[in-house]
Image: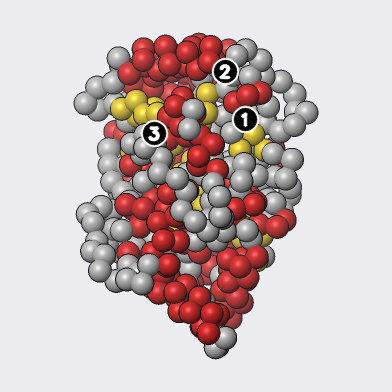
């Protein structure tokens, strides 16, 4: 298939989980204007290139949403951790520069910040101050944490609102499996972590709190040659009950990812020691049981890539256009630099700029040049050909809008207030 031709219609594509429906999210008021501007810029650029005239430069926009890795330090050593090789680098953000960068990005269009991986966010010494600072900029904030420091979540709970969320990566239904998978460096139990949720909800019921469960099967590995992982398929239903009984709003299940030799995060279900069909049957039986514990206040969610895996269509989502447009709209800022995508976090060819990429206007201008270079130089149809990319449909939607003479000018905004990409 031509890299820039639309992918074949995927009638088998399951309904997207709203959290992964990035096309709809980009059509929300507050985000759509920037998307229309981006499509118009790409159209003007391609036209100028075809006519041999001066191409317009990319304006010094911020992405609409960032994954912000506050630290690379982690107080666990999870056997399935996809970021294993960049953990505990000893390299940190300078707090003041990071604050300046967030303010500069907000002024340039940033709407949301996900405090997430490459380390445990709550280990950042000024975690609570940083969350409050992000909220003072009127940005949406989310925290993905390993649950080891729920007291820090409690400390900031009052400043969160209904658009914000916290998700705990727990991946187990018993403490024995929790310990074996996560190897916490200080003593803590799964029960103690779960017991930390009701006080947070009592203090502020507005933010959604989730229990995240990466499904791990025997034979999976975080990277080629990594030590064996602990399987957790048989605890799926148990974990759903545990989450519901401790006041989580939802549990979400997703399949384990692997770091490919080139550094990309990919699905590799064929690494299972047992036949894939029998692994999937066991997962389905557990998920069906898990769904029986759902209530009006507790949801059981299967991620989009888990549905694709079960349907056997996950390879269809590895076909990307040459240009990944999402890298202009969503980036990863870590102590190690600015990256074009979470799936390539820490990979040299995906690094856009240093960690101070948005520290002031001058640097933001330089970063825009680097993003423009990445849009041209990073061939997603090659670099992401093994990635089951959750932005696949959105990237093709944007590509088609750029090639369509009408662009997106007639598009109207849809309801919604979820700016996390
Ligand atoms: S195509 Fe997908 S995996 Fe590749 S850089 Fe873009 S968003 Fe990331």
Q: Which circle's residue, 2 or 1, is located before the other in the chain?
A: 1
**Dot 2: what SS?**
helix
Q: Nearer the viewer, residue 370 or 10?
A: 10
Whether residue 138 is visible to the viewer of this picture, yes or no, is no
Identity of the residue drawn at 62% across and 12% down: 274
Q: Residue furthest bottom?
A: 53
In the visual, does 29 lie left or right of 65? left
Mark 1: few/some/many CA within 10 Å (<14, 14-19, 20+): many
In the visual, does 187 lie left or right of 404? right
Identity of the residue drawn at 70% across and 51% down: 347
Given contact means CB atoms under 8 Å apart, are the residues at marks 3 and 1 in contact?
Answer: no
Mark 3: few/some/many CA within 10 Å (<14, 14-19, 20+): few
Residue at mark 1: 268
- Residue 293 point in image, percent of width and height: 30, 16
Residue at mark 3: 12
Please state which of the two labelled residues, at mark 2 or mark 3, is closer to the viewer: 3
Identity of the residue drawn at 32% across and 67% down: 408
């Amino acid at each position: 298939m031509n890299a820039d031709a639309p992918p074949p219609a995927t009638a088998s594509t399951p309904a997207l989980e709203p959290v992964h429906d990035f096309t709809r999210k980009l059509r929300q008021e507050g985000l759509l204007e920037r998307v229309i501007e981006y499509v118009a810029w790409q159209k003007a650029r391609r036209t100028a290139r075809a006519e041999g005239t001066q191409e317009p430069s990319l304006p010094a926009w911020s992405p609409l949403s960032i994954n912000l890795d506050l630290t690379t330090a982690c107080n666990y050593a999870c056997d399935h951790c996809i970021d294993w090789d960049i953990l505990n680098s000893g390299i940190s953000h300078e707090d003041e520069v990071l604050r300046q960068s967030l303010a500069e990005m907000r002024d340039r269009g940033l709407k949301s910040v996900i405090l997430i991986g490459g380390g445990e966010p709550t280990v950042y010494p000024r975690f609570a101050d940083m969350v409050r600072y992000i909220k003072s900029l009127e940005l949406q904030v989310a925290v993905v944490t390993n649950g080891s420091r729920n007291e820090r979540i409690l400390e900031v709970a009052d400043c969160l609102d209904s658009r914000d969320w916290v998700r705990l990566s727990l991946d187990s239904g018993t403490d024995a499996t929790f310990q074996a998978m996560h190897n916490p460096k200080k003593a803590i139990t799964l029960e103690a972590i779960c017991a930390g949720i009701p006080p947070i909800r009592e203090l502020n019921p507005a933010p959604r709190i989730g229990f995240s469960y990466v499904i791990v099967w025997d034979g999976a590995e975080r990277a080629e040659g990594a030590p064996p992982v602990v399987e957790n398929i048989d605890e799926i239903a148990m974990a759903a009950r545990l989450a519901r009984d401790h006041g989580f709003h939802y549990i979400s299940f997703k399949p384990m990812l692997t770091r490919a030799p080139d550094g990309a995060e990919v699905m590799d279900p064929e690494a299972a020691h047992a036949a894939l069909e029998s692994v999937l049957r066991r997962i389905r039986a557990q998920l069906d049981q898990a769904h029986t514990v759902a209530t009006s206040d507790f949801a059981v969610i299967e991620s989009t890539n888990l549905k694709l895996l079960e349907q056997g269509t996950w390879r269809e989502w590895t076909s990307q256009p040459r240009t990944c447009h999402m890298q202009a709209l969503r980036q990863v800022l870590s102590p190690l630099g600015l990256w074009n995508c979470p799936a390539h976090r820490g990979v040299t060819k995906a690094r856009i700029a240093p960690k101070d990429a948005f520290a002031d206007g001058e640097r933001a201008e330089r970063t825009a040049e680097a993003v423009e270079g990445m849009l041209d130089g990073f061939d997603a149809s090659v670099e992401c050909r093994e990635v089951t990319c959750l932005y696949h449909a959105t990237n093709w939607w944007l590509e088609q809008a750029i090639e369509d003479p009408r662009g997106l000018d007639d598009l109207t905004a849809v309801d919604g207030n979820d700016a996390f990409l």
